[in-house]
Image (cartoon, grey):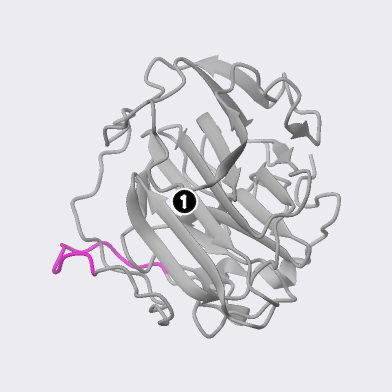
Amino acid sequence: MLVENSKLWKISPILISFNQLRIQKISPPVQPSPAPTPMGQNPPVSPMPNPMPLPTPGGQTLPITINPAKPWTNEPSGFAVLFDCGFDDATCGGKLDDTYKSKGSTLNVVQDPTAPLSKSNVMRSSLFYPNKTGGTQLGYYPSQPVKQIYVGMFWRTNLEFSGNKVEMNKMFFMRGPSSNGFFGQLNYGMPGFFKIGFSHNSGTLNNDHTCAADLGLTCYPNVGSGIVSTGQWHQLEFYMKGSTTTTSRDGILRWWVDGVLTGNYTNFNYGPSFNELIWSETWDGFGNGTGFKADAHHFIDHIHISAP
């Protein structure tokens, strides 16, 4: 199944060369997490050291306590709900576009009594080893482009999830007319652990003033560790504000892992608006679907999207 291309995008492999990612070896914590980067200042581009003990792979239960009545603690005030789904159905009753018709094959609803919010049905997207293609592409398209967007979800992998060979495991795309960026799992250099990071993944943008790799393609955690463990439920929250233009350096990129601010970039080129929100691993056989050592599964318990 070819899932690298959306209806609007066909990205050259040259633009997403993740072999340049810098993976840091784990070492004992030597200092507490730094305070969030003040607005308007350039954050560092290098990965931050691990500020706390690593979670245990396979712990499964969400490592934080949430208020089921208000689970999205970092959703900006005044945002209105665009979409909210607990995955009793894999496409949320047809509200999500199943681009490659994977429902019932590599896209299914399964039972998980440890699901943190919408017990106990969860969405499962799968790559069955040794296949090099699989997974799904689910799309939500706002009725009109929005300048700011917030996405929250509860997510985990299976314990055996080993990651692909291209150093970055794609998960959730936040696309605009001139942008194709995604949040994903950066290979951490230790089995069972990854870091959540972002890539703008767009040849028309340049963020090398604030992020790493060619054109500033890779944005590492620059506030918290962003470490996630396989088999463990985690809460992921993403916020983006489009820049005035593709070169104005006034966009905002933020993300949280288990309620903790992980990345904060306030001089970002992106957007300038958002019109496609896509879950896609791009397990298409061209690198992204290779390197696994066992079946690979993503599970989502709930997804929530809002905008001003």
Q: Amino acid at mark 1?
A: Pro
Q: Position of residue 213 (x, y in %)?
A: 55, 78
Q: Give the extent of the magenta segment.
A: 23-34
The question of residue 32 being in magenta is answered with yes
**Residue in front for this viewpoint, 168 or 160:** 168
Is residue 51 found left or right of 40 in the rendered image? left
Is residue 20 found left or right of 242 in the rendered image? left
What count of labels does the image hold?
1
Q: Position of residue 84 (x, y in %)?
A: 58, 31
Which quarter of the figure has residue 230?
top left
Residue 96 in sight in this render = yes
Is residue 297 found left or right of 215 in the rendered image? left
Identify the residue shown where x is 58% and y is 43%: 306
Q: Quadrant of the N terminus?
A: top right
Which quarter of the figure has residue 110?
top right
Magenta-drawn stretch, dominant element (helix, strand or loop): loop
Q: Is 78 rendered above or below residue 41?
A: above
Identify the residue shown where x is 40% and y is 75%: 39
Identify the residue shown where x is 56% and y is 60%: 240
Identify the residue shown where x is 70% and y is 69%: 202
Q: Position of residue 117 (x, y in %)?
A: 42, 24
Q: Is 166 rendered above or below residue 296?
A: below
Which residue does the numbered mark 1 point to in the structure image?
76
**Residue in front for this viewpoint, 276 or 58:** 276
Q: Is 53 rendered above or below residue 48?
A: above
Point out the residue furthest to the bottom here: 209
Label 1 neighbour load within 10 Å: few <14, some 14-19, many 20+: some
Is residue 99 found left or right of 212 in the rendered image? right
Task: Say which element carries label 1.
Answer: loop
Q: Position of residue 271 (x, y in %)?
A: 69, 66
**Residue in front for this viewpoint, 279 or 141:** 141
